[in-house]
Amino acid sequence: GRQRATDGEIYMPAQRAIWGLGPAELTLADIAKEAGVTAGLLVQRFGSKRDLLLSLSQQFSGGTSEMFAELRKGHRSPLAAIRAYSDCMAHMAATPAGFARNFAYLQIDLTDPDFRKHLMKHAAASRIEIQKLIKEAIEAKELSPDTNAKQLARTIEAVVGGSMLSWAFYQEGPAAKWMRQDLDAILKPYVI
């Protein structure tokens, strides 16, 4: 393997390895193989698998506004961008096995305080971004002017996460379609 790689060059391959393996199965060797570097290089750079995952988590939590900027760029309207957010979240449940793996990582995020602070940062930033999109959708006359943006952002957050979980129970059709139906159901009273 190569002996030189920036953290950025390691993050994407690490993410691919994570998508394929749960936290118990994942090793530094798996990540090294995916990144085309030696496991020794990763140990030198990050110390341990936990430290590499923590670094990845920090990187992810800091990239929330960029993620939403991408959603805005790719969609003609704020409302379309809100729906795209749901589709983006649905990638975590591309398959039942993939959802189970992501859920295993979420357990670490919820129980390990070092990971939890990054999870909270990402969640809070996401809610603010959703709120901004709602305000933009009100200005664009896509949503009713008396929409409470703060409350609707919180509801969207709850419905998207909850819908992903209920899809995992029923597994009827793709998660993205299932989640979009639930999102559209709560948006309906606000859509002009």
Image (cartoon, grey):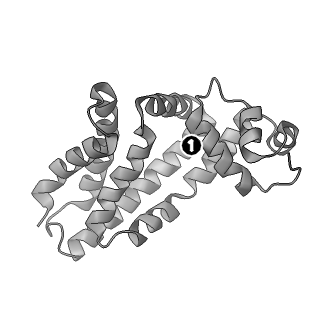
Name, please, the residue furthest toward the bottom: 140
145 relative position to 152: left or right: left
Q: Is residue 55 left or right of residue 171?
A: right
Q: Which residue is drawn at 56% across and 30% down?
A: 108
Identify the residue at image location x=18%, y=70%: 142
- Give the side of residue 2 with respect to residue 124, left or right: right
Res 133 → quadrant: bottom left
Q: From the viewer's perspective, is 165 left or right of 149?
A: right
Q: Residues within 10 Å of mark 1 (few under 14, many from 20)?
A: some
Residue 2 spot, x, y in % from top left: 86, 50
Q: Which of 100 and 94 is in front in this view?
A: 94
Which is more toward the observer, 123 or 81? 81
Residue in the image at 60% along x and 37% along y? 18
Q: Position of residue 53 (x, y in %)?
A: 67, 39
Tag count = 1
In terms of depth relative to the viewer, which is nearer, 46 or 113?
Answer: 46
Whole-percent x, y for residue 191 in the image:
14, 62
Vertical comparison of 78 with 56: above or below = below
Q: Report helix, strand or loop for mark 1.
A: helix
Name the residue furthest top: 24
User: Quadrant where the N terminus lies?
Assistant: top right
- 130 lies above or below 164: below
- Which image quadrant: the C terminus? bottom left
Q: Position of residue 182 (x, y in %)?
A: 21, 44
Q: Residue at x 24, y 54 (%)?
A: 152
Residue that numbered label 1 is attached to: 117
Q: Name which residue type carries label 1.
A: Lys
